[in-house]
Amino acid sequence: MTAPLSTVQVAVHTPSHSGVGDLLDYTSERPLAPGTLVRVPLGRRVVLGVVWVGDGAAAPGERALRPVAGVLDGIAPLDAPWRRLVAFAARYYQRSLGEVALSALPPQLRDLGPEQLARRLRRPARQAEPAITSDLIALSAEQESAQAEILSKPGPFLLFGSTGSGKTEVYLRCVQELLAQDANAQALVMVPEINLTPQLEERFTARFGAASVVSLHSGMTNPQRLKAWLAAHSGQARIVLGTRMAVFASLPGLRLIVVDEEHDPSYKQQEGARYSARDLAIWRGRAQGAKVILGSATPSLESWHASRPPTPDDPEGGRYQRLHMPSRIGSGAGAGELPRVRRVDMNHQPRRTVFSAPLLAALQERVERGEQSMILLNRRGYAPVLHCQDCGWKSDCPHCSAHQVFHKLDRTLRCHHCGFTVRVPRACPGCGSPDIVPIGRGTEQLEEQLGELLAAVRRPDGTPVRIARIDADTTRAKGALQSQLAQVHAGEVDVLVGTQMIAKGHDFRRITLVAAVQPDGALFSSDFRAPERLFALLMQAGGRAGRDAAYLAAQGTRCEMWVQTFHPQHGVFEALRLHDYPAFAAQQLKEREEAAMPPFAFQALVRADARTQEVAQGFLAAASHAAHAHGLPGLEQVTLYPAVPLTIQRVANVERAQMLLESSSRTALQRFLAHWQPVMQATRSQPEHKGLIRWLVDVDPLAI
Ligand code: ADP
Ligand code: ZN
Ligand code: ZN
């Protein structure tokens, strides 16, 4: 006689919107604990799954269930807090449980057979004692008090500290304290892009020893990721440093989560489950009893608002506790100061000026003194479009509603949306005229023009100026970014030109001038978050200047941030001049409140892709109509706006439309979305929406 079979419910990665239920039933010869990793048959394949319900009573008389194909016994089951996080994320971001669960696991787990896995696990996993190697510096009074608050209060905390105020040092100390209190404690430290901040990794390994620290980000190979993930899951790694994906790491001993540069848009995943790692960090911290620190010099308006102190009108205040570190680390006259902001009114410059005369003179001075400068332009390539002066032809991408960007170095026209690339034509494809000219400029052109303008300038040792460019084009090769950054750090570059890549996080020591040559575009964007992003970018960029007080003192220099603009009086630049984030935030929040926009309202976007705009919009209109016809719960508090094309409405021959949903109640919006999902599934299967390619929901979208 055989033993009775157990039934288990397993989360597997089914194609999203496939209509297959979230959990699939299988039989098992022995009971399996929830969280156990298993391999199960799905169609003709065998796939990785996570046992979600281990003791599901067998439903008698139903179709025969297939047995579990294998159990990954060597790996402890994923614990309940991890499963709750995944379940919450799936529900909140409107995706299937299996999709979120499986994409939160290292990809290699899917491919490894039991023997391969066993071999990998055989390596001894002993817990590393954090080896605190470096001598500790004395904290500033501001750092001291921030640390004391974090250690004694529950949080979550918004650590609002100027660039160079020593936030990272505070993270290090808090991690250290919490790990010292509990031998099983773990900390998760998230950064927007680990490749941009190799120094952070160095600082953590220098402080805690390489054995206690693992990284988790998409730049790692699959074996590296699996190894790091297992180290975190087993408790062997005490500190996980990672990008947004690390928010899903299995960390049984989690006591602290740090979200550095919490305002950074890259915390929001832009495909699949469109989660915000920052928001999930807050949720996870509360659910798992871990402290959460969000850190930034220019917090997101959401976090700023959530950390508002209580006032007589608002006795509760926000849910987060705000900690302020206004001063830069450093001492001595003129040191440790934020850069002086200089605006150049481009209305008074000759037409088509790229570098105004005063900026050029300032750059020249810096080069002659052997100091470094940084020029920021958030557009790569040589020029955003080529144009025929005779017939008006433009270098439009044939597959997208966008121009192909002119890249002069390799003589190509490249679409930055679909990647379509052609050789630059010798003559206009429309009329044959040779008069095709670039319009506008990108980083390649800046680099070239700067080379010409500064050709006669000499460094202190009499050698010519050295100009370098860092953007997505120069850093494609593996390790290229690291070596280019190393050159800047080593002082082998006098003027660095680049996109926002150069503005983030780097602890450059000898930069004394930062310039934004053309920041105006963002002022008039249709996206209500554009000014917020511009302000953060400029503050970040400015924060790269004057980081070494001793160097500034020795040079007798003051650091400067230059802005060339046609709108020098604009509030963004006025606030930048005063380094006054709170004033900027107050003004923006007032506008947002009056217009009932986030954080005073909650949004979701539904996007539809189809071969024609008509089909895409038609689906959204029908889904909206169905919601009203069904009188779905929550709808009374949710506004559904009409479907509209996206700003770039066609990409790779796919027409894209979207519909905005807004509510003053997050709960109502969530309730509505949950009920709407099946209605949209049903709508999709109607014959008139046959041409629909896909649709998706983006909850708390970052770009509208
Ligand atoms: P942030 O993260 O706020 O930009 P960091 O933590 O990177 O600032 O600190 C900026 C610089 O100041 C770093 O080089 C760091 O080593 C140094 N630093 C931080 N705290 C102190 C301190 N208490 N005393 C001396 N130097 C410090
Ligand atoms: Zn032409
Ligand atoms: Zn294209």
Image: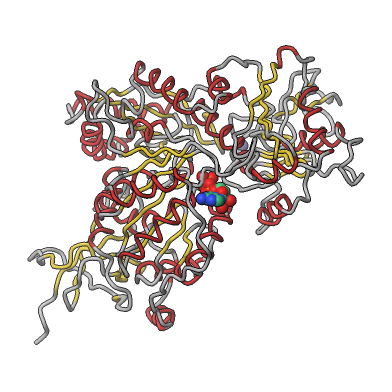
Q: Which residue lies at the image location 74% right of the left edge and 37% below the top edge?
A: 556
Quadrant of residue 378 within the rendered picture: top right
Q: Residue furthest bottom?
A: 1
Say whether residue 654 is left or right of residue 468: left
Count of numbered circles in the view: 0
Q: Measuring from the top left, give residue 220's x and y in whole percent.
A: 53, 62
Name the side, left or right, on which 629 lies relative to 124. Answer: left
Residues 336 and 695: in front is: 336
Kindly indicate the quadrant of the structure image that contains residue 512.
Answer: top right
Residue 277 visible in the displayed image: no
In the rendered view, tell whether residue 479 sits above or below residue 384: below
Image quadrant occupied by the N terminus: bottom left
The reply to whether residue 601 is visible in this rendering is: yes
Query: Is 525 or 436 nearer to us in this picture?
Result: 525
Q: Specify whether 323 is left or right of 287.
A: right
Query: Which residue is rendered at x = 21% and y = 36% of the image?
Result: 671
Report the quarter where the C terminus lies.
top left
Q: Where residue 528 appears, x then y in whole percent? A: 46, 24
Task: Measuring from the top left, give residue 253's x and y in whole percent.
Answer: 30, 64
Q: Residue lying farthest top?
A: 348
Q: Residue at image x 71%, y 33%?
A: 442
Residue toward you, 433 or 321: 321
Tell me which colouring the rendered structure shows. secondary structure
Q: Where in the image, quadrant-wise, is ligand 2 located?
A: top right
Q: Position of residue 553 (x, y in %)?
A: 70, 41
